[in-house]
């Protein structure tokens, strides 16, 4: 009797396990099918949105081209075609129009660009950009800041300024670029409280925005050279070099003793762009105090730009240096200066 009961229980257990296995397979298959269906739905929805945006932008295109070509009267509003009037009050269509305006404005300046800004203001599209700027998602926030800058919305500067120290790098980068784009040197006031380093790429972008703008204040530049943020000092040295601002020569020489290697390297490069006898003397003097071999070699390269025949005795002494790379660099610089003499 016991053996029969045991056999029956084993068979029941086996049957239950198989049944549970098939149930699990069915549930898993249902989940997979549901996920695939959801993905297809999302893809189709995105495609429909993209198609709708393309249709709207095509519809806006001819109107915007006519606006670009107009010799606009500042006191007169642009005329909106009858087929477009209903669209400018619908959020989706307004966003499509905004995207097209930004795209065109990035490629246009002068009267054409001014017309696009005027239309942007008339339709109060700044509200959409400001809404994105205040959004909690970083990519929406960065997009909103960029739009406000492109459309020269200085009324939002007070809101943009705190974002120059935002924790997300893309947000603060867009905010910093916006401030400089709108205010030039005055926009760099965020340097005073900058908590994060400026990346090399970001420094290049800021320098591009200031390329045709002469340095406006010697006092503020001197304060940047004394910033506790090494990347601010580095940027300022690049700015001085690009502007060939010889009036800051003594301040640049002081940066040769900066504790940060990158700053010292930039100071050496900067002195090469504002060549003078004091600059060459400072580089030659600093050579023996420089603890970084790479920077010592940078100094020897810098002397090619700023040095004179007066550096030849110093370079001849380096021909006796134990380091071969130093001897070669000194010889190369010496030959260059001899050819220039």
Image (cartoon, grey):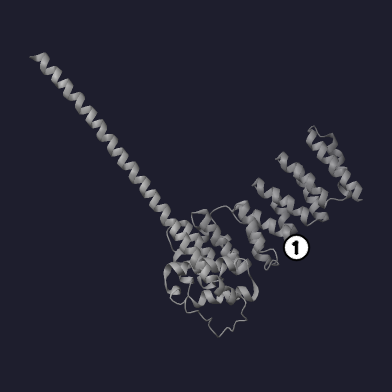
Residue 36 appears in the picture as rendered: yes
153 up-or-down from 175: above or below: below
Residue 117 appears in which quarter of the rendering? bottom right
Q: Quadrant of the N terminus?
A: top left
Left-right relation of 192 to 46 = right
Q: Position of residue 8 (x, y in %)?
A: 13, 20
Disc 1 designates what residue? 247
- For image coordinates 66% across by 50% down, the residue present is 263
Instruction: Looking at the picture, tell me which residue is in the foreground, 28 or 224.
Output: 28
Q: Position of residue 218 (x, y in %)?
A: 69, 65
- For image coordinates 22% across by 27% down, the residue present is 17
- For image coordinates 66% across by 47% down, the residue present is 262
- Estimate how packed mark 1 is, as few (under 14), some (14 to 19) or many (20 or more) residues with alpha carbons within 10 Å: few
- Helix, strand or loop at label 1? It is helix
Total numbered labels: 1
Residue 148 appears in the picture as rendered: no
Instruction: Looking at the picture, tell me which residue is in the foreground, 173 or 2.
Output: 2
Instruction: Looking at the picture, tell me which residue is in the foreground, 92 or 263.
Output: 92
Q: Position of residue 204 (x, y in %)?
A: 65, 56
- For image coordinates 36% across by 48% down, the residue present is 37
Q: Position of residue 66 (x, y in %)?
A: 59, 76
Q: Residue furthest left?
A: 1
Residue 106 appears in which quarter of the rendering? bottom right
246 up-or-down from 32: above or below: below
Instruction: Looking at the picture, tell me which residue is in the foreground, 12 or 198.
Output: 12
167 up-or-down from 35: above or below: below
């Amino acid at each position: 009797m016991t053996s029969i009961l045991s056999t029956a229980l084993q068979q029941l257990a086996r049957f239950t396990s198989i049944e549970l296995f098939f149930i699990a397979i069915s549930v898993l298959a249902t989940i997979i099918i549901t996920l695939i269906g959801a993905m297809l739905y999302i893809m189709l929805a995105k495609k429909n949105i993209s198609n709708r945006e393309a249709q709207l932008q095509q519809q806006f295109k001819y109107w915007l081209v006519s606006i670009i070509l107009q010799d606009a009267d500042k006191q007169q509003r642009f005329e909106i075609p009858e087929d477009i009037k209903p669209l400018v009050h619908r959020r989706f269509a307004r966003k499509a129009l905004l995207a097209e305006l930004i795209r065109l404005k990035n490629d246009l300046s002068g009267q054409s660009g001014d017309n696009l800004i005027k239309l942007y203001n008339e339709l109060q599209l700044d509200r959409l950009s400001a809404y994105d700027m205040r959004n909690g998602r970083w990519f929406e926030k960065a997009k909103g800041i960029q739009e406000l800058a492109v459309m020269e919305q200085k009324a939002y500067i007070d809101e943009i300024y705190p974002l120059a120290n935002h924790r997300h790098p893309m947000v603060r980068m867009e905010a910093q670029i916006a401030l400089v784009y709108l205010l030039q040197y005055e926009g760099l006031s965020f340097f005073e409280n900058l908590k994060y380093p400026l990346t090399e790429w970001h420094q290049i972008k800021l320098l591009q925005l200031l390329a045709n703008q002469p340095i406006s204040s010697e006092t503020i530049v001197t304060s940047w050279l004394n910033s506790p943020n090494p990347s601010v000092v580095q940027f300022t040295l690049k700015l001085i070099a690009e502007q060939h601002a010889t009036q800051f020569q003594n301040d640049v020489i002081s940066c040769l003793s900066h504790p940060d290697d990158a700053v010292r390297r930039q100071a050496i490069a900067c002195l090469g762009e504002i060549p003078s006898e004091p600059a060459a003397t400072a580089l030659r003097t600093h050579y023996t105090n420089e603890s970084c071999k790479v920077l010592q070699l940078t100094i020897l390269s810098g002397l090619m730009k700023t040095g004179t025949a007066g550096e030849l005795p110093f370079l001849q002494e380096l021909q006796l240096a134990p380091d071969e790379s130093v001897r070669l660099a000194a010889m190369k610089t010496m030959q260059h200066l001899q050819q220039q003499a």
